[in-house]
Each structure stands twice: as C-alpha cells, then as structure tokens.
Image: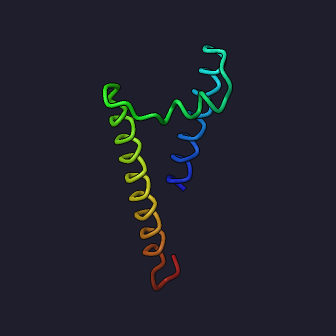
Amino acid sequence: MVTFFTILLFISMMLFTTILDCYYYESNILDCFTHLFIFDPGLREWMVYLTFIFGILVAVIQDVRFKNNKGRGKGANGK
C-alpha cells in the first residue's frame, strides 16, 4: 500500500508540474510532459531520479515488512 501511494504521489506531482508548465509556457501538454524526462547532464536531474528510486525502494521495503508482520501476528491462539 505504501508503494501504491508513493507511485500515486509521483504521478500526481508529474501531472501538476506538466499542467503548470503548460500554463506558464503556453505550450501543449505532450511537449511539457516529455520535457520533464529529457536528461541534460548539466541540470543534475540524476538527483531527482535517484531520490525517486530511493523512495520507491523504501516504500517496497516497508510494504514487505508490513506483510511479514501481518503474517507473524497470527499465533496459536488466533490473536
């Protein structure tokens, strides 16, 4: 569930940024959306991608931990 919300947050931030760029630069949505993923070495976008990958990794680890703790919670008494 944590992974789902992380991806949902990322997608909503991308859409908001795209709409804001389209309004600001008076361009169409496809151009603004593809401009978000152009990798220019001088812009240090790798920091953004690395942070996103790190966030997804942490979310997956938390989901696995929640799943493991949920499975361990059932003891012999059914509690």
Left or right for 20, reference 54: right
Residue at position x 68%, y 25% from top? 28
Q: Is residue 35 above or below residue 21?
A: below
Task: Out of 78 and 55, give the one closest to the viewer.
Answer: 55
The residue under the point 60% across, 37% down is 12
The residue nearer to you, when weighing 70 against 65, is 65
Left or right of residue 15: residue 6: left
Q: Above or below — where is 15 with respect to 54?
A: above
Q: What colour scheme governs how the chains and residues are painted in the rendered image of this protein?
A: rainbow
Residue drawn at the location 61% of the way across and 29% of the way down:
31
Q: Is residue 45 left or right of residue 18?
A: left
Where residue 70 sits in the image (x, y, percent)?
48, 69
Give the image quarter of residue 42: top left
Which quadrant of the figure has residue 65? bottom left
Counting from the top left corner in percent of width and height, residue 51 is at 36, 40
- Residue 25, placed above or below residue 33: above
Residue 32's spot in the image, x, y percent? 59, 27
